[in-house]
Image (tube, grey):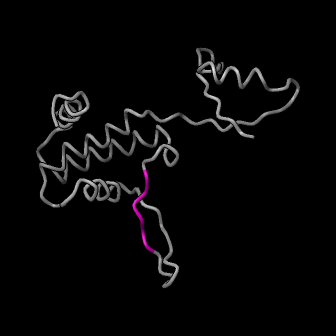
Amino acid sequence: MAQEVLFLKEAGGRLSPADGHSAELIDALPAGKVYGATIKRKRNVQHLKKYWALIDAVWPAQALYPTSKRLGNAIKRACGLVDENLDPVTLKPYDEVGSIAFDAMEQDEFEEFFSRAVDLICNHILPGVGREDLRRRVDDILEGRAK
């Protein structure tokens, strides 16, 4: 049975358990066996909230999209976050908006996507609004100073 173990990279390149649960799982492994692992940077839950705060900051200031969900999907599409699918009846390909869920995107990928989304907003959706102004608005939403 596969178990998720979290590691912390230390100075010098050594990996150590990131928490008590991970340490217990490693300690329980029989010695003398070979184990495999897939290494990926864990997503930051605050960044997921940050994306939706970005959408909440932009949606009231634009008039193209009737809902924040549509705005969010349009931004994902414009940033290239699409998956090609195939219609089972017509067999015609179509694009679906991709996901920013934890299991769909690693942290580094998310950071690149988020940066592209901010650029898109500042250049096309709210021209004239700078990155820093938008960042402050998002921070205000995240910290409860604005809705």
Rendering quarter of residue 45: top left
x and y percent of residue 114 in the render?
A: 34, 43
Residue 93 shown left or right of residue 133 in the figure: right
x and y percent of residue 17 in the render?
A: 64, 20
x and y percent of residue 93 in the render?
A: 47, 76
- Which residue is found at the position 32% from the left and 42% from the top? 51
- Asked if residue 46 is positioned above or below residue 106 in the image, the reply reads above
- Which residue is found at the position 25% from the left and 46% from the top? 55
Residue extending furthest bottom? 90
- Asked if residue 117 is positioned above or below residue 136 in the image, the reply reads below
Q: Nearer the viewer, residue 124 or 30?
A: 30
Rendering quarter of residue 82: bottom left
- Asked if residue 31 is positioned above or below residue 130 in the image, the reply reads above
Residue extending furthest top? 11
Residue 120 shown left or right of residue 103 in the figure: left
How many numbered marks are there? Answer: 0
Residue extending furthest right? 32
In the image, residue 46 lies in the stretch drawn in magenta:
no
Q: State the extent of the magenta-drawn residues as a range.
A: 94-99
| Quadrant holding the C terminus | top left
Residue 90 shown left or right of residue 126 in the figure: right
Give the dominant element type of the magenta stretch: helix, strand or loop: strand
- Which residue is found at the position 45% from the left and 43% from the top? 109
- Which residue is found at the position 59% from the left and 20% from the top? 19
| Quadrant holding the N terminus | top right
x and y percent of residue 84 in the render?
A: 48, 67
